[in-house]
Image (tube, rainbow, N blue to C red):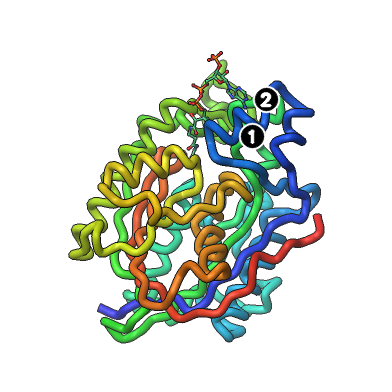
Amino acid sequence: MTGVVLTGIGGALPDNHVSNADLAGLMDTSDEWIRGRTGIAGRYWSRTTSTGDLAVAAGRRALDSAQRDEVDLVVLATTTPDHPCPATAPAVAARLGLGPVGAFDVAAVCSGFVYALAVAKGFLAGGLARSALVIGAETYSTILDREDRSTAVIFGDGAGAVVLCAAEPGTPASLEHIDLGSNGEDRQLVWVPGGGSYERTHPGADRSTRFAMLGREVFRTAVTRMAQSSEAVLRRSGWTTADLDWIVGHQANERILGAVADRLAADRSKLIMNLDRVGNTSAASIPLALLDAVTSGLLAGGDRLLLTAFGGGTTWGSATLVWPEVKAEPADLIPT
Ligand code: UT7
């Protein structure tokens, strides 16, 4: 089967930084609680910047990093699209000057980036495209209930993007294997209850269009699912934990990532984390963590990576990746 290689990476953040101290001025919380329970010290909340704006900026950086100005496909993972209809990806493709390429959104909440990688890998391996821009972009600040301290302190806005290309099987720097899963029975763990078609046919349904989450239950489920999915993709790849140089988990919570590493019997020093600076950016979190790691010199060509995510749906997914020799710029801070 055709191989798939990563050839570029980029990211973008809105330039409005919100510290824990800022939030303590808005609600009954503290820097100590937020840092201690999550590891987060700050996040970026856009004022007017849309998900599409962030996706365009991240996409441009990824294309520059890959030294190309065209791709055959754009796959955008997001739960906070610019409009309920249409998808955000076609506008992003147009704004990037990519022409009439296939472009669509993938909705798998915080697992969205791994799902989008899987979709793009399928297109490339199946010969439907030769190259793809895969973007995770979110503006959770637009759906958060800013009076709910149990969710508002966790999420931030941002976008991360990678360029994938078809390659000869066995080419170095390849996206190896992927594991995906879901459990719709648990959809109420992380959700926006109202605003969709369900409430129309279910009198009395919760019509709130604000984001809601059952934090403790999500915590437990996330650890179990990410660990199981990681084990599955490692098996499929013929790798063991000892083969891994880095684990890049969805940046949900430092304690969740620590527990996943423990379950995999991996040293916690293998965890790549940037959630202290950007919070949980949902579908953008894995590419933004990868970008931070490459621009700070942590990642080297040939390193073996495990990516793993858990999110609303519930959904989960993991991937194995051999890191390429790639040059990248830090995330673009865009005026908001
Ligand atoms: O991206 C995927 C989706 N999301 C996640 O992965 C999130 C997963 N869950 C978590 O990260 C954690 O469950 C949270 C960070 C959301 C909460 O941490 P926790 O250790 O599970 O706390 P808790 O919900 O059990 O709450 C403990 C206490 C409660 O007070 P009482 O009832 O013990 O008096 C909460 O009301 O902490 C209180 N609390 C807060 N206090 C200060 C909840 N949020 C805050 C806050 N500041 N922001």
Quarter of the image with the C terminus is bottom right
Are there few (<14), some (14-19), or many (20+) residues within 10 Å of tag 1? many
Q: Residue at x 47, y 57 (%)?
A: 113
The residue identified by callout 2 is 29
Ligand 1: does it lie within 8 Å of the C-beta at label 1? yes
Give the image location of residue 314, x and y in percent. Answer: 40, 38
Q: Is residue 261 visible?
A: yes
Q: Please state if 185 lies on the left or on the right of 134 as rendered.
A: left
The front one of 149 and 51 is 149
Disc 2/disc 1 C-alpha distance (Å): 9 Å
Q: Please state if 285 lies on the left or on the right of 18 as rendered.
A: left
Q: Which amino acid type is shown beneath numbered disc 2?
A: Thr
**Circle 1: element type:** loop
Residue 153 tag number: 1
Q: Please state if 189 lies on the left or on the right of 280 as rendered.
A: left
231 up-or-down from 237: above or below: above
200 up-or-down from 61: above or below: above
223 up-or-down from 168: above or below: above
The front one of 236 and 78 is 236
